Image (tube, rainbow, N blue to C red):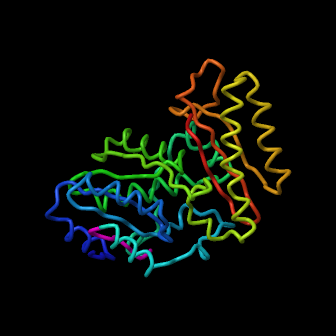
Amino acid sequence: MLIAHTISDLRQALATYRHPAFVPTMGNLHGGHIALVRQAKPLGDVTVASIFVNRLQFLPHEDFDNYPRTWDADCAQLRAAGCDVLFAPREADLYPEPQTFTVHPDPALADMLEGYFRPGFFVGVSTVVMKLFACVLGQTGGTAVFGKKDYQQLMVIRHMVRQFALPVTIVAGETSRAADGLALSSRNGYLSAAERQEAVALSHALHQLAQQWQETPSAQPAHEQQARDTLIARGWQPDYLTVRRRHDLLPATPADAPGTLVALGAARLGTTRLIDNLEF
């Protein structure tokens, strides 16, 4: 696996390839990331992953400085998965000057849910993804693989690619889960042993919410409140548990058919904020 730390080294490494398949990450890799790398391999003539902890998408009170950096383990996992090129820029390489040009996604999509509780988050995500696309895929275009666990992020990136007419095909990867159903996440490492056992309650709450919606869709507000109350009673601090339409993330209505919806949730357990979703 070739490791490039500068944009010029990366472009030199990719100069002979026509269709890179790209998986952007912030490192601290787990099985979900590796599943995306394996999914990407047959989609291009070279498989590229990036590791970059993006300061722009962290709010002032969030965990940028303490975000786990696990370089050696990350490289070992990527090599084992067959990654060909790892782009690991330093902050000064990717942002050599203050990033005063930024990408502001449509507020109708980006200011709800995650964007409401983490204002500015999707500006940071969109800006770094646009820049990574320019670095990795800017010479030829290609394919990029993003996980469905970050459901709203996936939608924001898809809209950005379409509106800027970028020569990039976005492919979604299914959420990887532990045996008990907990969505794999780098932030799961923050959980205590007791919190890790409890953490699967978020997934259970989303399954229950989806089932209740299908039984009585007209009672959606009550179902959502019940889901929040259930987690609160278990010691969680929920931000949202809600049923939305997949194509625009607006609230579901009784006229919406199963097969077009997604239940999404975000809640804090102790000091760790977890997110999950369930299409149904």
Front residue of 92 and 185: 185
Q: Position of residue 174 (x, y in %)?
A: 46, 48
Look at the image and say whether residue 150 sits in the magenta stretch.
no
Q: Residue furthest left?
A: 16
Q: Residue at x 48, y 67 (%)?
A: 26
Relative placement, left or right, of 256 versus 130 is right
Q: Identify whether 204 is placed above or below 270.
A: above
Q: Quadrant of residue 111?
A: top right
Q: Position of residue 1 (x, y in %)?
A: 27, 75
Q: How many marks?
A: 0
Q: Residue at x 20, y 65 (%)?
A: 14
Q: Residue furthest bottom?
A: 72
Q: Quadrant of residue 61?
A: bottom right
Q: Identify whether 26 is placed above or below 127.
A: below
Q: Residue at x 29, y 56 (%)?
A: 21
Q: Position of residue 35 (x, y in %)?
A: 41, 58
Q: Residue furthest front?
A: 179
Q: Residue furthest right?
A: 233
Q: Identify whether 149 is placed above or below 27.
A: above
Front residue of 217 and 160: 217
Q: Which residues are magenta?
A: 83-91
Relative placement, left or right, of 179 versus 216 is left
Front residue of 61 and 49: 49
Q: Quadrant of residue 270?
A: bottom right
Q: Identify whether 92 is placed above or below 217.
A: below
Q: Residue at x 34, y 56 (%)?
A: 133
Quadrant where the C terminus is found in the figure = top right
Relative placement, left or right, of 64 versus 217 is left
Q: Position of residue 273 (x, y in %)?
A: 68, 59
